[in-house]
Image (tube, grey):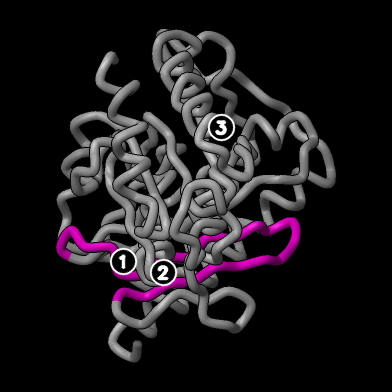
């Protein structure tokens, strides 16, 4: 839409600049460190590429909109904690994930995404998700639709769980949350879905719901940068995104269930059966 044309152009430019940094590091080699996050063991990886890619994204946004707030995973704008929560309540805030799928990235698996979202007065307004290594981009504007490769994106028209693939993920937790995830997956398989996929990059998983490749995607814990842009892409493609309990999303760490809408209630019932134990 013309109203958000400038924001969309900046989001696309920022994502492509950050994606270029990430792609360059991936092709040239990189060093990985372990994030210092209590209780997450050695699974939560951060790389110099994450930091540099986010810095590049933030520079593009700040140049265009110096008065807007920025919330980024690697802290180039602001990250988690009280300061981050205050940032998310700003009237104009950009939410950035420079490299989603860092574990894939550091192990040389060519499946990782970048996500840039703009929220106005708490509402998802512009979203860009990309697979920069493949120059593959997904864009959405509130009220203006979702687009992929120049074509309007639509969620799957399937009405039954046994007609679709379901994507899922799990956080770095290797305890009750992971077990509940796998129990829910078992239930989905018992209901004869076409299969399950854990690809390791929630931003792209959400995009796959929007283009109809997945009938649904769920994860029991995601940060705002993981879903901020992809959520809008799914909604503008005709889908539904809620918590795993079926409640509205907030811009806080939460569970996420995205679907084509037609199988959403069935999946909420499955998710809630296992998630309520946590």
* Residue linked to disc 1: 66
Magenta segment range? 121-142
* Residue linked to disc 3: 189
Residue 127, numbered circle: none
Image quarter of residue 189: top right
- Tell which of 276 and 249 is nearer to you: 276
Distance (Cα) linking label 1 and label 3: 49 Å
* Residue linked to disc 2: 63
Q: Nearer the viewer, mark 3 or mark 2?
A: 3
Residue 85 is situated, as x and y percent measured from the top left of the image, at 20, 39
Residue 81 is situated, as x and y percent measured from the top left of the image, at 25, 29
N-term-proximal mark, 3 vs 2: 2
Residue at 59%, 24% (x, y): give it.
45
Distance (Cα) linking label 3 and label 2: 48 Å
**Labelled pair 1, 3 in contact (Cβ < 8 Å):** no
Neighbours of disc 3 within 10 Å: few (<14), some (14-19), many (20+): some
Instruction: Judge whether residue 230 is colored magenta.
Output: no
């Amino acid at each position: 839409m013309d109203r958000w044309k400038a924001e969309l152009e900046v989001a696309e430019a920022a994502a492509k600049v950050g994606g270029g940094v990430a792609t360059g590091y991936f092709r040239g080699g990189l060093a990985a460190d372990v994030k210092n996050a209590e209780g997450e063991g050695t699974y939560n990886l951060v790389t110099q590429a994450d930091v540099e890619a986010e810095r590049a994204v933030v520079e593009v946004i700040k140049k265009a909109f110096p008065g807007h707030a920025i919330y980024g995973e690697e802290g180039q704008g602001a990250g988690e904690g009280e300061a981050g929560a205050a940032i998310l309540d700003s009237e104009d805030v950009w939410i950035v994930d420079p490299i989603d799928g860092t574990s894939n990235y550091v192990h040389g698996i060519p499946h990782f995404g970048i996500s840039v979202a703009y929220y106005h007065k708490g509402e998802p307004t512009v979203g860009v998700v990309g697979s920069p290594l493949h120059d593959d981009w997904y864009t959405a504007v509130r009220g203006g639709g979702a687009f992929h490769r120049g074509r309007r994106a639509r969620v799957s028209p399937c009405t039954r769980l046994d007609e679709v693939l379901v994507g899922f993920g799990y956080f770095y937790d290797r305890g009750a949350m992971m077990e509940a995830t796998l129990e829910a997956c078992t239930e989905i398989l018992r209901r004869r879905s076409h299969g399950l996929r854990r690809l390791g990059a929630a931003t792209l998983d959400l995009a796959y719901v929007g283009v109809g490749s997945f009938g649904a995607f769920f994860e029991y814990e995601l940060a705002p940068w993981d879903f901020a842009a992809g959520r809008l892409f799914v909604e503008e493609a005709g889908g539904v995104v809620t918590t795993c309990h079926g409640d509205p999303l907030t811009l806080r760490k939460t569970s996420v269930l995205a679907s084509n809408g037609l199988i959403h209630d069935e999946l909420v019932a499955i998710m809630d059966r296992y998630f309520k134990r946590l």
